[in-house]
Amino acid sequence: MSKIAFLLADQFEDSEMKVPYDEVKKAGHEVVIVGLEAGKTVKGKQEKAEYKVDKAIADVKASDFDGVVIPGGSSPEALRGNKDILNFVKEVNQSKKPIAAICHGPQILASAELLSGRTITSYPPLKDDMVNAGSTFVDEEVVVDGNFITSRTPEDEPAFVREILKAI
């Protein structure tokens, strides 16, 4: 059984959190919601889902986890300016553990300067940002490049979840 961190803040894309979270849990893995403040309730932008943050980013170590999922929406924008979040994903990446990011999730990877030389996808309007961060952008439902798994939108969730479960 793997222990997977879900990086989350307010205004996440509801299904991009709910679907992978439920499926990873259903597959028997431990899921931990990591945010800026433990105990805080964060709400999805569609207001169809809300979660309580299990652990503050300041209180976790990358070595405690076997992978990371970064749901999209506005949540990544709220997290990408936090040094602890960026260091966490850098350390997970150094260990070659899976990092799955959908929609706006790759913004965190860009801010952590992890995209150089990688092939990824994201929410299509972010293409220029992803290319400027050094990645090769492709418009596909899911892209696996080494330990990175990226997808575009809620429509891509089945492929996104499939690749996450394969990787963990």
Image: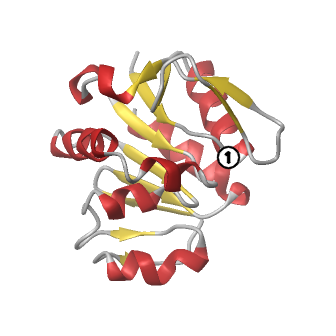
Left or right: where 42 falls relative to 60: right
Image coordinates of residue 168 in percent, x first then y, are 40, 32
User: How was this image coloured?
Assistant: secondary structure
* Amino acid type for the residue under numbered disc 1: Gln
* Picture layout, residue 110 above or below residue 85: below
Of residue 117 and residue 73, the one placed in the foreground of this image is 73
Of residue 148 and residue 6, the one placed in the foreground of this image is 6
Of residue 161 and residue 35, the one placed in the foreground of this image is 35
* Picture layout, residue 160 above or below residue 40: below
- Snapshot quadrant of residue 9: top right
Please say whether residue 105 is visible from this viewpoint: yes
- Snapshot quadrant of residue 57: top left
Image coordinates of residue 100 in percent, x first then y, are 44, 47
Numbered disc 1: secondary structure:
loop
Please say whether residue 65 is visible from this viewpoint: no
Image coordinates of residue 126 in percent, x first then y, are 53, 75
Image coordinates of residue 122 in percent, x first then y, are 53, 67
* Picture layout, residue 151 above or below residue 35: below
Q: What residue is rendered at 61% in x and 54% in y?
A: 74
* Picture layout, residue 147 above or below residue 27: below
Left or right: where 35 falls relative to 155: left
Please tell me how crowded label 1 is: few (under 14), some (14-19), or many (20+) other residues with Cα within 10 Å.
many
Q: What residue is rendered at 59% in x and 23% in y?
A: 40
Image label count: 1
Q: What residue is rendered at 36% in x and 54% in y?
A: 148
Which residue is denoted by mark 1 in the rendering? 11
Left or right: where 140 falls relative to 86: right
- Snapshot quadrant of residue 39: top right
Q: Quadrant of the N terminus?
A: top left
